[in-house]
Image: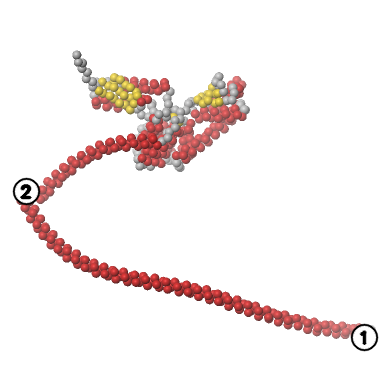
């Protein structure tokens, strides 16, 4: 048994050894094949890389040759330019040398001519002295005395001519200034398209039927009392069919009341609490609309960088009127007139337009101080950092302060043009007639006045005086006194011309 095991073990060992040798031989062959393949592939890669390197070298060489060729071309061009410049410089040098020679020749000629001229000048001086001596002997006075006499006579003649020229210039300037002023004013008026805007102190609110009137009045009048208390407007509900009248001097209040009534009637809920809520909401809307109107006005007129508070005050002008003329329309009209007139005179039209828009800003303050509107407007403009010439123009447009800029009289003139044009302003007939009668009576109160006539809608007052009681000098003083008294004691739009007429009549009868 042991022998079989041993034999078996030996056989197994022999088999293992045989398998080892076979495997080793196979592995060796495989390894040799791999080594051979790797060597072949390495050789191929080497050849490929060598070819690529050669191609790259050829490309670089070609590129280098191109760069070198280009540089050589540039160098040759530069050399050509340098040669051309050198030739040009040589030509200039030769030309300068030739000119220098010519100049030297000219200098020599000039020196010779100067010598000749000096000799001639000496000869002329001798001859002149001889002539002067002869003239002095003949005239009996020295040359200095003759010169003084001639100068004095020329001075007198020059003074006479200068006075004549000054007088002629002054007369011509007066005529020209008058014509030019009329031309500028007429031209400015013609170029402005005006609109006639007359407002009333009442607003009519239309309703669909008369049943709405009872709802607006409310039980025992509670609604209408609440509406009047909230808006400050008198609401007149009478027998007028399908209409309610809103009466108030302040157009802003009337507009608030109208819009509030419209919302209340449309909504249908009308009671005191609702009325107060709607009125407050409408008041806020009106304030926003005021700002929007101010902004739109400044944009339309091309006025920039205006303080927001001044923009708001400009918007408030929409709801103010002066003698029935809408204040915003009036200010826009004055602004356009000022710009046209300033451009005609060669002044800054933008500053003139800005001052024209703001000239009546003192009529729409939030509070009502006891100041003329021109002074108040000037203070508001100064408060919001407007230029000094604009502030002065605002304050001086009714002569409350002295004018210190050329813009100020333009504002005054354009304000008068806008207020005096036909249809701009209106007055109640009774007050208009009363004003004219007061004007005539005021002139009649002066001694020596026989008759007075207010003509041209109160723009001119003609005063007839007796020639035996009033002299020419007194007539001039009388016109000034009447104008001063009208200006101090009366209120009127624009200006009033006072014409005093004094005539002497000689009457005889042929019998």
Q: Who's the residue at 90% across and 83% down the image?
A: 8
| Quarter of the image that includes the C terminus | top left
Residue 325 figure quarter: top left
* Label 1 packing within 10 angstroms: few (<14), some (14-19), many (20+): few
The number of numbered discs placed on residues in the rendered structure image is 2
Decide: is 278 above or below 217.
Answer: below
Q: Which residue is rendered at x = 61% and y = 26% of the image?
A: 271
Instruction: Provide residue 44's location: percent of width, then percent of height.
Output: 65, 79
Looking at this view, name the residue that lies furthest to the top: 511
Residue at 31% across / 69% down in the picture?
92
Q: Is residue 450 visible?
A: yes
As drawn, the label of residue 3 is 1
Q: Quadrant of the N terminus?
A: bottom right
- Which residue sits furthest front? 511
Q: Earlier in the sequence, mark 1 or mark 2?
A: 1
Residue 161 in which image quadrant: top left
Observer-side mark, 1 or 2, equals 2
Q: Residue at x 23, y 40 (%)?
A: 166
- Crowd around label 2: few <14 · some 14–19 · many ≥20 (10 Å): few
Q: Which residue is mark 2?
A: 139
Residue 426 pos. (x, y %) = 42, 26
Q: Secondary structure at mark 2?
A: helix
């Amino acid at each position: 048994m042991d022998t079989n095991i041993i034999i078996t073990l030996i056989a197994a060992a022999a088999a293992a050894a045989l398998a080892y040798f076979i495997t080793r031989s196979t592995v060796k062959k495989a390894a040799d094949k791999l080594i051979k393949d790797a060597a072949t592939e390495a050789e191929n890669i080497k050849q490929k890389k060598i070819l690529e390197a050669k191609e790259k070298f050829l490309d670089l060489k070609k590129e280098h040759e191109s760069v070198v060729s280009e540089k050589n071309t540039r160098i040759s061009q530069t050399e050509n330019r340098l040669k051309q410049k050198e030739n040009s410089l040589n030509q200039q040098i030769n030309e300068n040398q030739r000119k220098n020679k010519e100049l030297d020749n000219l200098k020599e000629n000039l020196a010779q001519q100067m010598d000749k001229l000096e000799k001639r000048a000496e000869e002329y001086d001798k001859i002149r002295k001889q002539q002067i001596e002869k003239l002095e002997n003949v005239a009996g006075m020295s040359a200095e005395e003759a010169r003084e006499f001639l100068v004095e006579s020329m001075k007198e003649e020059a003074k006479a001519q200068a006075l004549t020229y000054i007088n002629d210039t002054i007369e011509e300037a007066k005529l020209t200034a008058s014509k030019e002023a009329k031309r500028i004013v007429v031209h400015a008026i013609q170029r402005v398209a005006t609109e006639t805007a007359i407002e009333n102190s009442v607003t009519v609110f239309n309703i669909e039927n008369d049943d709405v009137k009872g709802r607006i009045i409310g039980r025992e009048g509670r609604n209408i009392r609440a509406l009047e208390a909230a808006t400050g407007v008198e609401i007149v509900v009478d027998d007028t069919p399908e209409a309610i009248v809103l009466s108030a001097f302040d157009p802003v209040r009337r507009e608030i009341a109208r819009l509030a009534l419209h919302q209340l009637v449309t909504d249908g809920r009308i009671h005191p609490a609702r009325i107060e809520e709607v009125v407050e909401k409408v008041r806020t809307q009106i304030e926003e609309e005021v700002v929007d109107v101010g902004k739109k006005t400044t944009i339309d007129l091309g006025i920039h960088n205006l303080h927001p508070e001044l923009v708001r005050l400009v918007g408030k002008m929409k709801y103010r009127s002066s003698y029935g003329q809408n204040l915003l329309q009036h200010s826009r009209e004055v602004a356009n007139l000022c710009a046209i007139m300033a451009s005609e005179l060669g002044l800054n039209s933008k500053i003139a337009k800005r001052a024209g828009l703001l000239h009546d800003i003192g009529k729409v303050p939030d509070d009502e101080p006891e100041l003329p509107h021109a002074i108040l407007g000037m203070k508001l403009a100064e408060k919001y950092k407007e230029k000094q010439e604009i502030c002065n123009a605002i304050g001086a447009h009714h002569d409350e302060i002295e004018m210190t800029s050329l813009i100020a009289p333009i504002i005054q003139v354009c304000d008068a043009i806008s207020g005096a044009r036909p249809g701009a302003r209106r007055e109640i007939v009774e007050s208009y007639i009363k004003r004219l009668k007061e004007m005539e009576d005021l002139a009649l109160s002066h001694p020596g006045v026989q008759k007075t006539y207010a003509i041209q809608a109160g723009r001119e007052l003609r005063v007839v005086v007796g020639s035996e009681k009033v002299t020419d000098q007194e007539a001039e003083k009388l016109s000034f006194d009447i104008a001063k008294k009208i200006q101090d004691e009366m209120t009127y739009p624009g200006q009033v011309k006072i014409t005093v007429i004094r005539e002497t009549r000689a009457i005889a009868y042929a019998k």
